[in-house]
Image (cartoon, rainbow, N blue to C red):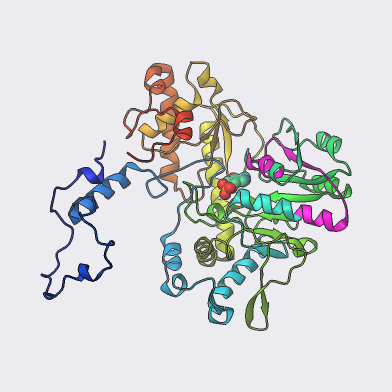
Amino acid sequence: MSEALIKDYGSPGRKGYSLPELDVVEKNPAESLPEGMIREEAAKLPEVSEVDVVRHYTSLSNMNYGVDSGIYPLGSCTMKYNPKINEDIARTPNLTNIHPQQKEKYVQGSLEILYELKEYLAEISGMDEVSLQPASGSHGEYVGLMIIRKYFEKKGETRTKVIVPDSAHGTNPASATMAGYNVVEIASNEGGMVDLESLKAEVDEDTAALMLTNPNTLGIFEKDICEIQKIIHDAGGLLYYDGANMNAVLGYVRPGDMEFDVIHYNLHKTFSTPHGGGGPGSGPVAVKERLAPFIPAPVLKKEGEKYYWDNDRPDSLGRVHAFYGNYGVMLRAYAYIRTAGAKGLKEITENAVLNANYMKHKLKDTYELPFASDSLHEFVLSGSRQKKEGISTVNIAKRLLDYKQYAPTIYFPLIVKEAIMVEPTETENLQSLDRFIETMKVISQEIEEEPELVRDAPHNTVVRKLDEAKAARNPDLRW
Ligand SMILES: *Cc1c(COP(=O)(O)O)cnc(C)c1O
């Protein structure tokens, strides 16, 4: 299962090309280079043929696992299949051969695409203005909170606190802290939702915002959302919607209609653009009219049939990304939204919710289900029953790899012991859902009958169990 380094392939003199004999006889082209710039010995490059290169990289790619290999039910991450048409669109030469410093009048078509994407995102969330600049979900959160900061500054109010439920995504408290706020965490109730009494107890004239992940990281939709927004707005605070889970509600409810003031999207989750391994992503921020003056500059505008960048934004928090954001990701998301259409977007949600609930129903007798509330696009099980047999959730996750299935998110959300957070996504069919369910049951059986098989997993992956703390701190990236 190992693969040699490319430098260890090949042999001296082997090459990957054949060119005609050099017919420039008078003068060696290399001699026309300035003195001192000519190599004395050849560069130490691997001497390999084309087939060596193809086999080497194909072999490496086969060691990897991705959404093109099979189910990737990583809760909260929305690792769904990315249709290849998105890639075709993003590689269109007319779009890839332009430069952000070209004059507006020469790139009107490209600006039209970005403008339409903004309009779709505003419509889907029920918001008024959109910035496409942020490069990820967490970047969007940070930008959203800075917009909120600017808003209160302009009003002459100092508010220092941001309330974050304990069922929020981990980036929420981190972003609020980076934006200079004190984070106040509130506990969930036994249904896994915001506890209204705890919320009321924390909200006061010092509250800048509530950051809500909805559906939350348990996959549960906050049923008291109307009440929640009223509590915050009555105290003069603003409402921030973590929209990374929008695939659970597309076309069914809109954060704007729930009276939220700011939302970020994860184009690289909901709108199906490749992600993982650090990006690039795109985390557009959408706001209500009263916050529009504060969003990052420049803002894309339309006048008659003409698109232009509005740089005259005196209250803007400024630029948060070089040029206009991660354009390639936006093109893929645009293609995805256009190919799905309004009806298709609703079906995405229907399938995401159906798939997750089917799996939850089939697995809840084998693995403990700590929150029984109805859930949407993902659900959280607990491995605590298996833990009593001496097998931890991490072992279950590793054993799944032996069966050529990717493991769900584990040990998150923090409010569930031995958490197993599953998001099958809408792109899996019945066969692949059943295969995952069956594998999870087989592993539970193995824990009873042959626990060391699970404890020592994985057995047939490229590398065995890694020291995960060390792997993250001392990545082995070169030989
Ligand atoms: C993924 C996710 C984020 C963070 O997005 P990144 O693009 O990874 O920074 C925030 N909130 C929720 C609910 C998420 O699932």
Q: Residue at x 41, y 32 (%)?
A: 400
Q: Is residue 274 above or below residue 75?
A: below
Q: How many numbered discs, if any?
A: 0
Q: Relative to residue 337, is residue 89 drawn left or right?
A: left
Residue with the most extreme front position: 35
Examine the image and state in which quarter residue 259 appears: bottom right
Side (left or right) of 413 relative to 451: right
Residue nearest the observer in this picture, 454 or 324: 324
Q: Is residue 419 magenta?
A: no
Q: Please tell me which residue is depicted at 77% across the width and 67% down the height of the picture.
A: 314
Q: Name the quarter where the N terminus is drawn.
A: top left
> Could you tell me if residue 474 is visible in this image?
yes
Q: Quadrant of residue 156?
A: bottom right
Provide residue 255's location: percent of width, then percent of height: 71, 55
Specify start and end residues of the magenta stretch as a single range.
148-176
Residue 125 in the image: state x and y as whole percent: 68, 59
> Does residue 259 appear in this view?
no
Quarter-of-image position of residue 377: top right
Taking depth in this image into account, of 393 and 158 the one nearest to the observer is: 158
Task: Say which of 166 and 55 sits in front.
Answer: 55
Magenta segment includes 167: yes
Give percent across and percent down for residue 434: 43, 39
Question: In the picture, which quadrant includes the C terminus?
Answer: top left
Q: Position of residue 106 (x, y in %)?
A: 53, 81
Q: Is residue 200 left or right of residue 37?
A: right
Q: Residue at x 73, y 72 (%)?
A: 312
